[in-house]
Amino acid sequence: MAFEKPVSWYRYVWILLAVGIVGYAVYSGFRSYSRLTAQLATLGGVTLGDSRGDVRYKRGDPPVVYGAAQPGDSVVHGYYTDPKTNPDNALPAGTDTDTFPTWAYSSNATMNPHFDVTFDAKSGRVAKIDCVDQSEPPTAYCDRVAGLGIWDAESRITSLLGAPTQQSIDEKSGVKTMDYTDIGLVFLLKRERVFAIYVYGTESRKPLSVSRFMVWLAQTLVESWWQT
């Protein structure tokens, strides 16, 4: 007569433990993915899709506003919302802050560094957020996006996000543009260091490819391990 050998209880424990570890890993990965997609749509506390009221609530009224770029113009004219600041560049008669598509904020009168919010002409909601800091040395005025910030090296951008969708270097200024069009994120660099970050798009939650997420997650885990 054949006898079946009873399965030891600890084998079930190991199976349950393995299932639990896998489940936790999947849950943690999903949470990390959700956090990253949210980070890619937010800069300086402002999120793509915010209304003008949302921006006022988060940042206050802007000290400077900019009109839309005109064909052939190399610069966009800015106006001070407080006429006492600069009477010659005060808001034109018949306009107010909401007339202008771009609101600019800064920690000082020089507007360097500065934080800009641009609203979509049709929806009136935030379509682009950017922060530029060309101070020497750079300040901590601009927030980080997906773990990347001002003065980070070009190599760190590619290690966290992989190769950009497109990139170019301006021949006259020497400024490099790294554009991640699939996630609506742009970096401007000088001397291989970030000095400007742009977040753009119409969605507060951007679709993120699994491959780009895995690159970001792997590098984030490596950096966390080295810091412990």
Image: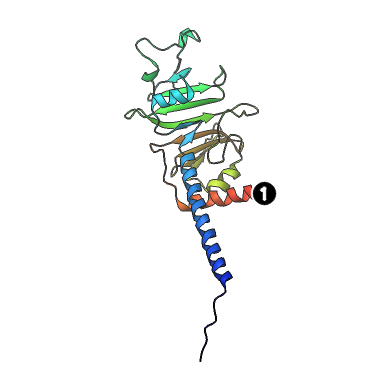
Which residue is at the far left?
A: 122
Q: Is residue 74 above or below residue 32?
A: above
Instruction: Judge left or right: residue 77 versus residue 216.
Output: left
Label 1 belongs to which residue?
Answer: 226
Q: Is residue 205 above or below residue 126?
A: below
Instruction: Judge left or right: residue 67 versus residue 12.
Output: left
Q: Position of residue 34 (x, y in %)?
A: 46, 45
Q: Position of residue 105 (x, y in %)?
A: 50, 22
The one nearer the camera, 153 or 219, is: 219
Q: Position of residue 104 (x, y in %)?
A: 48, 22
Q: Quadrant of residue 204 in the image?
A: top left
The one nearer the camera, 163 or 218, is: 218
Q: Quadrant of residue 200 in the image?
A: top left
**What residue type is disc 1 on?**
Trp
* Residue 199 seen from this side: yes
Which residue is at the far bottom?
A: 1
